[in-house]
Structure formats: C-alpha cells, structure tokens
Amino acid sequence: MSSDSACVHGLNSLVYHREHHWLRQNVSIERERPPERSFRQTHIASIGVINMRSAEDQVVEDEATLGYQDDEESFFQDIDLLQKHGINMADIKKLKSVGICTVKGIQMTTRRALCNIKGLSEAKVDKIKEAAGKLLANGFLTALEYSEKRKQVFHITTGSLEFDKLMGGGIESMAITEAFGEFRTGKTQLSHTLCVTAQLPGEDGYPGGKIIFIDTENTFRPDRLKDIADRFNVDHEAVLDNVLYARAYTSEHQMELLDFVAAKFHEEGGVFKLLIIDSIMALFRVDFSGRGELAERQQKLAQMLSRLQKISEEYNVAVFVTNQMTADPGAGMTFQADPKKPIGGHILAHASTTRISLRKGRGEMRIAKIFDSPDMPENEATFAITAGGITDAKE
C-alpha cells in the first residue's frame, strides 16, 4: 500500500471539530470530547471513493485514539500544582508570562534566569525550585526505564516512503531535526508538506495534530497547503485551520514567539504535534554582522536552540528547522569537493538532534543525506517535489 492510500484509508472514519462543537457534512458523534480538544481532524473530501468500515471497527479506533490522547495529557505536570506546596498564584502567573507552564519547565530553567523574572526574588526562586523538586522524580533512570519512556516518541511522515526510511520513520518528536541546503533544494517545500502530513493519522496510533509555523523569510503560502491537501483528499479549510502561523521580523521577535509557543502547547496539551521554523538562521544573519558580533550572535542562538530542545522534550512535539548555506573561503585550500557549509557553526551543529543535507538532482529530483544522527547510519534517499508536495521519486 502506498503512503497516499494508507493515509486515506486511515482517515475513513475521522471527522474534525473545533472548540466545543463538531462541524461539516452530517456527522453524528456519540461521545463528548474534552473542551480543550480543538484539533479539527482532517475530513475526507471525496467520501464516495472510500469503503466505510463497520461501526464496531470505528469504536475500537476511537477508543485507541482517546487512549493515545490521554497519554499525551499526562505527559507533563501543570505548574498550578505548585499551589499545593505553598507557591501563590501571583508568582505562578509570573512564570507563565515567560512561557514556563509546567513543573518540568522550572527544572529546565536556571536560578539566575528565574531571578531575572520581574517580581521574583532569590528567596521566592529557592522556594519555587524546592516545590518543583518535590513534584519531580529527580535522579537516574535505568536504560530499560528510559526505553519505556521513549515509547512515547512518534514520527511524522515526510510524504516520501524513501525519505521516511532514511529518517527511521519520519520527523521524530522530542528532538530537533534540521534540514539544510542551497536555495531550491526543497527545504520550504518539505516544511509545507509536513504541515499537512502532521495532521494525518499515522503508524503506532499517532492521531495527527496541529502545527505551529514560524516564518522568518516570508515564504509560507497557504495555497500551497491546499495543493498538498488535494493529494491526500483532505478538506482545505480543516488543514489551514490546524496550522498556527506567525511571521518573525527580528531574532529577538523570534525568541519572544517561543514564549507564546510554550504557552500554546500547554494550553492545548497533546493537540500540537509539530513546530516548524523556516529558517532558523535568516534573522540572525541580518541582526548580527561581522566577527565583532559573532560571539553575541552565537550566544543568542545557543539560548534559542536550548529553548527549542526543552520545549520539544517538555511537550513531546517534533521540532523541524531549515537552515541556509554559506561558501567556505578556506575550503579550496583543503581540496574539499563541496566548498559550501551550513551556517550557525558548531552551536547549531551540536544542538540539532538530526541533520539532513539536501541537494539538487535532475529536474524535480532532490537527494537527502543523513549528515548527523544519534541512531541513523549515514545514507542517502532520493525524493521528488510535485504539486502534491514531497513524494517518492519516479525513476
């Protein structure tokens, strides 16, 4: 079965809803969903070509999906739990104002950073840290225990089976995946395709979810999502409604948006599955120039990447970023085959969990290569850019 038909088959009995009510095409629902479930599950546009399964099969699928969502909700502890340990609501609101919405978020933030929050003294910070320590299981896990925890990780399909195979199943959650390459290598097209495929039910009970897209280069096109939605026979309006878009204008604005991202992931726990930044370095290239500002740029970049990694682990979401290339003047002296390299230096190289190199092939063909990964071997895959987004290359 192809990836397209598999996605369509998995969508047979799905409808979507928004806020507290269900929308579209005479759908009756037998159970109430929690009010925070505002993900509009993508609805089949061409119902006539699909063989509907029995009601019994649908009930089994719905129960499995609900079970998956319950696991997502229990993934993090709400920061409001600190009230039971003597922290007042005013201080909790101050933490939420800077995007710290979970108990684990406190553990991920240094005392110095907490002291910089307006209205929090050192004594209050110590008390907050102590309260968070009581709620969290500090210490070590055995590799077996951590292996069980890793079972919550999911993968989002790229739209190409070959590309997915290269990536070990797709874009991984609780990790930062970076795709770099020259212009016209498919970085933005891959980002747009993921905006649609992330909403589709996938393997291992993955129910699909919402996406946040941070655009730094003004390359996001909603009409492109409609073309990709047509490939999977899903409703245009539902697909667009499930993508939250923000345009970043400066590197500082880009960092501030991450506070909003963390708050949104907390507000709709388990609903958002993917954060895309296209591209991660564009604004840093503009805001910082020359070697005199390089150290400051790299420090700000390190802080942003650290925040992204923490958000991905805190809320179990996938983070996908694109990156640009630069010419390496010293490469000619070492007889390198390719004198170009991704920008961001070692800071970005170490922060990204998986790095993918994209390059042009013949016509609409593109080649993806694992540049760095903790668990995938160095290998290549060929894919194509079509009207329906990223797909397998046809020889």
Image (cartoon, rainbow, N blue to C red):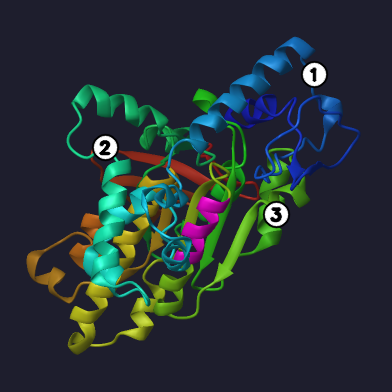
Front residue of 377/124: it is 124
Question: Residue 22 appears in which quarter of the rendering?
Answer: top right
SS under mark 3: helix
Label 2: few (<14), some or many (≥20) within 10 Å?
few
Q: Tell whether position 261 is magenta.
A: yes
| Residue hosting label 3 | 240
Q: As drawn, is 237 to the left or to the right of 271?
A: right
Whether tag 2 and tag 1 are in contact, CB under 8 A, the answer is no
Q: As drawn, is 352 to the left or to the right of 155?
A: left
| Residue hosting label 2 | 137
SS under mark 1: loop
Label 3: few (<14), some or many (≥20) within 10 Å?
many
Q: Earlier in the sequence, mark 2 or mark 1?
A: 1
Q: Closer to us: mark 2 or mark 1?
A: 2
Q: Where is residue 28? Give x, y as percent.
A: 86, 28
Q: As drawn, is 377 to the left or to the right of 184?
A: left
Q: Magenta-highlighted stretch: main secondary structure?
A: helix
